[in-house]
Each structure stands twice: as structure tokens, then as C-alpha cells.
Image (spheres, helix red, strand yellow):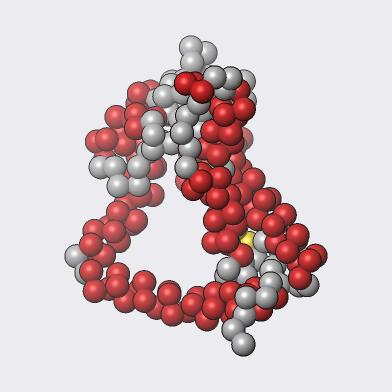
Amino acid sequence: MTQFKDKQSFLLRSKSGDQREIVSVGLFDYPVLMAADILLYQTDEVPVGEDQKQHVEITRDIADRFNSIYGQTFKLPEPKISTIAARIMSLDDPTKKMSKSLPGGSLNLLDDEDTLRSKIMKATTDSEGKIKFDLKRPGIYNLLEIYETLTGEGREIIEAKFYGKGYGEFKKELAEVIIENLKPLQERYRKLMEEPETIEKMLKEGADKVRPIAEQTLKEVKEKVGLGTK
């Protein structure tokens, strides 16, 4: 959705033919395809980040419009957004969200321990040196939110724990917290990679579970718009 809006904005700003970027119809269809992925399975809640709420909003608009014309067909899904660390920012530039397109500023789930430590130790902070939750200091605030999310500790407890300590000491502990939290996931990943038949079985079971829901939704939609088989 963000890419769609960026491209759309670019095209509207362009004034000459040679300034325009060639964009496929796939880009313009993208929001509708995203909505279809949600509505097809009669979804109740969609876990998204704060910046992805717009995906769910346009999905609700499409579903509501269809229901108003053809009768109750789709559920109106609700966005499920975490109240803590709803948007993790880039380690390099904490004014931008963390993204795989910015490798140095992102933490990957399969990064090894040395890589994780290196990224955290190099993360942008500021010159104040005080470890406090302060939105005006996006670098340390971002790191503190990550720590808060992974430990489950309250903000007052975290600030008291690191009172009078430097960024270096905090970053070292944060890196270890991240490493410990990722260990079970990484171990599970490595185990599954050694058992491709288990992955195939899980995928088949998941598909078998949701296929009847998708087929029923599609059948109902076709009938209501006059495309049903006679």
C-alpha cells in the first residue's frame, strides 16, 4: 500500500513524459489483491503493524461496499495492532521504519549472534547518554521499545535498571536479550529445514483447512454477481 501511494504520488507530480515512470497494472491492482487475500477466508482480525492499518481499512471499505450492493457476504475484519513497539524503527536511521531494504538498520530473524551484537552496538542513539523513554530521542527510544517488548518489563523498571549506566552497557544487554529470544525460533527453523517432509505436511494440512472456506466464499460471490454456474 505504501509503495502504491508513493508511485501514485510520483505520477501525479510528473509533468513531462520522460519524467514518468512506467508502472504496470499490477501496482494499481495491488490494494484489491491484498483485500482479496483477507476477505476470501472470512477473516475476523488481521495482525498488522501500525503503518499497515491502511491495508485493513481499504479491505473494510471494499467489503462494506460489496455487502451494501449484494447483501451480507464478507465479514468486516478488524486490525489487530500491538500497543507496544507497534512500529520498530531502523537501527541506522530511527526516523524510518525498520526494513529489509536497509540491511544495516534491520534485525533479521536468522542473523547469527555476532551479527546481532554488531548491529545493536552500532545502532544510532544520541549524545545525551541518558537511558529514558523519550519520544524526542528516537534512537534510544527505539532500542528501549525493543527491550521492553522482548522482556515484558515495565518502563519504570527498565529505566531504574539502567539508571546511571551508559549506552554501551545497555546495548550489550539488549543484544543478549534479542539473541536469547531468537534462539528457539532459529533452532526450530534449522530443525524444519532438515525435515522437508514435515514442512510439506504442515502446508498441506493448512491448505486443506482453509480451502473449503475460500471455495464457499468464492461460490457465494460468483452467484451474487451473476457468474454462478447454472
Q: Position of residue 67 (x, y in %)?
A: 76, 67
Q: Nearer the viewer, residue 21 or 203?
A: 21
Q: On the rendered image, what quadrant is the C terminus found in?
A: bottom right
Q: Is residue 214 left or right of residue 195?
A: right
How many marks are shown on the rendered structure? 0
Tell me the residue at 75%/61% (across/down): 64
Q: Is residue 182 left or right of residue 217?
A: left
Q: Nearer the viewer, residue 119 or 211?
A: 211
Residue 61's image quarter?
bottom right
Which residue sits furthest bottom? 230
Q: Nearer the viewer, residue 8 or 107?
A: 8
Which residue sits furthest front? 17
Q: Is residue 128 left or right of residue 67?
A: left
Q: Is residue 211 visible?
A: yes
Q: Position of residue 9 (x, y in %)?
A: 60, 29
Q: Position of residue 76 (x, y in %)?
A: 71, 63
Q: On the rendered image, what quadrant is the N terminus found in?
A: top right
Tell me the residue at 69%/57% (across/down): 62
Q: Is residue 142 above or below residue 55?
A: above
Tell me the residue at 52%/37% (across/down): 3
Q: Nearer the viewer, residue 179 or 130?
A: 179
Tell me the residue at 61%/43% (across/down): 50
Q: Position of residue 90 (x, y in %)?
A: 45, 30
Residue 165's image quarter?
top left
Q: Is residue 143 visible?
A: no
Q: Is residue 37 above or below residue 112?
A: below
Q: Is residue 74 above or below residue 183?
A: below
